[in-house]
Amino acid sequence: MLSAATKRKLRHVVLAGTIVSFPLLYLGPVTLEEAAVTMAGLAVGIVTAVLAWFAF
Amino acid sequence: MPDGYPAPSMTGPDLTILNWLLAASPVVLLVVAIIWLNWSAPRAGAAAWLLALALALLIFGAARDHVAIASAKGLSLAVFVLTIVWTSVYLFNMVDKLKGIDAIGRTMAMLASDRLVQALLIGWGFSSFIQGITGFGVPVAVSAPLLIMLGFPPARAAAMALVGHGWAVTFGSMGSSYYTIQLVTGIEGEVIAPHMALLFAPIIVASGMLVAHIQGGMSALRRSLPIVVIAGAFMAAAMYALAWGGAPQIASTVPGILGMVVLALLSRTPLLRAAPQAEAAPEVPPAGAADEPDARPMPFILAFMPYLLLITLSVISQIGPVKEAVRNILWGLDYPAFETAQGFAVAAANDYAPIRILNHPAPLIFFSIVISAIIYVLAKRWRKGVAWEAMKLTYGQSLGSTIGVTTMVMMAVVMADTGMTVLLARGIANASGPLFPFVSPFIGLLGSFMSGSNTNSNVMFGLLQLETARALDIGTVTISSIQSIGASVGSPMAPAKVLVGAAVVGLAGKERDIFRIVIPYILGLVVLAGIEAIIIIELLPALSR
């Protein structure tokens, strides 16, 4: 398992991932209508959620 | 419903037992993960969002774009709610770092020498006022130590603060939970806010009675009954007036203050029956004596000023011409309509979850912070580094709740926009039938118990309750209100809040002592909400909306 210090650091990464995923999830399907951006948004969101599972 | 969550279509996935169980599985995962597996809210929320995403794509006919749009909507809604969280927690921390909260608490303690009145003032009034302006366990963290300082036993001190502020949660935190239920259900604020306030009235009075009972059993309850009923009536009337008048963000703060004032005044009248034995209240240590010998105590008016500013700005923002002048200064995203492969249609939403400059609590709190900081500097009460210290503290305190709220909101909107929530509602409607109004507040309680948040509960179950009420053809406004009321009074039972209470009163590791006191009282309040719902819907349909 991860150490408490690693978990604390990872929590900041989770927040950053959440912030990054928002514009990608919006721009991909709504503004740009670009599948690659949508996929990137979902990928960032999913990876962030997995990291959240470990970090919290 | 321009500001609201567009009502989804009632077509969509077929109601079969397998589909219903699959649709319920993200919520079941949340419950099991938090209650039995002891996962934190962010961890459980992340897992539940991933499961909802997978089910939406693989079972319920959503396309990649649909789940991306639903998740982005969830993030929009999270920003709407979290900006209130961040700014209100920051404001509290800033005032606390300047010893303002200590000054406010000490003034409360000086208002009365009777221990029962002190319990009511702090456990019922002050904790609710704190809930009105911040929330997230802070009412317990601030009120319980004050009660201990006044000589109350730790477990009872925590229990009084927990039970006493439950009524103030929905309109508390500058209305974040209220705005969430309003957004999620799409019901106009002018309709749901006063109706909810009306339903809160008996809960407010009952909360005061329960605090008295925790303090001194039936004799304390009998002694304080007249003043609790009168103060509760004033508080309920204030809540109703503010909710009706378009200022729901202060509909817990102002009643909390008013309750303290009325209690303090009535405690000097014969309405408060004499105590069987005169109980001398222990002396409160002078401000700053323990930790900072040189610290000057802050005058109450300065300590309270940021919150007075907030109340004033909230009132100004509701003045017709002011409201109209700034109505279009907002931040909100437009989302397109879509339809899943199983025929579930979601309407387009313009300016989704808008943050209006003077009609959203976050900008108002921000202005209060800036003006207060300037006044503190001018009054030579400012201390270098306070702004940064409060920022760091707020970041640390809010990080977990930020991820928790975000993931749970994303899960809830993915479920809502792919037909899962409507499916759940239809199933519950079919199963519970006429008993549903009584069951409704327990669903709210379940959500807040799981997540520690009235807001999260409203996001998770608000639409579910609305759709169930629609399916049963009963008052949608009443049931949506009861959802939030159940979540509000139930949230102090959440492990997250009880843990805060236990930590601040020195009972860490002995949380069971607090749970044992709190659970029967909280369940009593939820039962009262269920009885209200049954009475209004079944016996007084004219009052139901």
Image: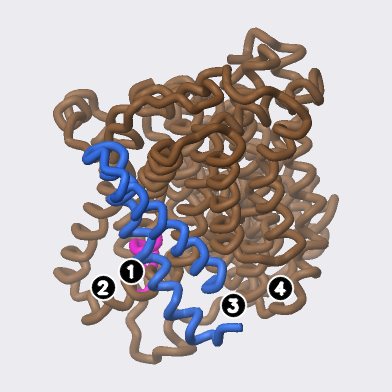
Of label 2 and label 1, which has the lower sequence position? 1
Residue under numbered circle 3: B283
Q: Chain of mark 2?
A: B
Q: Which residue was labeled with disc 4?
A: B154
Q: Is residue B398 left or right of residue B170?
A: left
Q: Name the mark on residue B94.
A: 1
Badge 2 marks a residue whose secondary structure is helix
Q: Residue at x 72, y 47 (%)?
A: B224
Return the x and y of residue B8 as percentages of the image width and height. Answer: 50, 23
The chain whose colour is brown is B
**Badge 4, how many Cα within 10 Å: few under 14, some, many 20+?**
many
Q: Is residue B209 left or right of residue B405?
A: right
Badge 3 marks a residue whose secondary structure is loop
* Three-letter code for the amino acid on which mark 2 is drawn: Ala
What chain does badge 4 belong to? Answer: B
Q: Quadrant where the N terminus of chain A lies?
A: bottom right
Question: What residue would you read off at disc 2?
Answer: B387
Please give the chain letter of the residue carrying mark 3.
B
**B32 left or right of B234?**
right
Q: Nearer the viewer, mark 1 or mark 3?
A: 1
Crowding around mark 3 (Cα neighbors within 10 Å: few <14, some 14 to 19, many 20+) is few
Q: Earlier in the sequence, mark 2 or mark 3?
A: 3
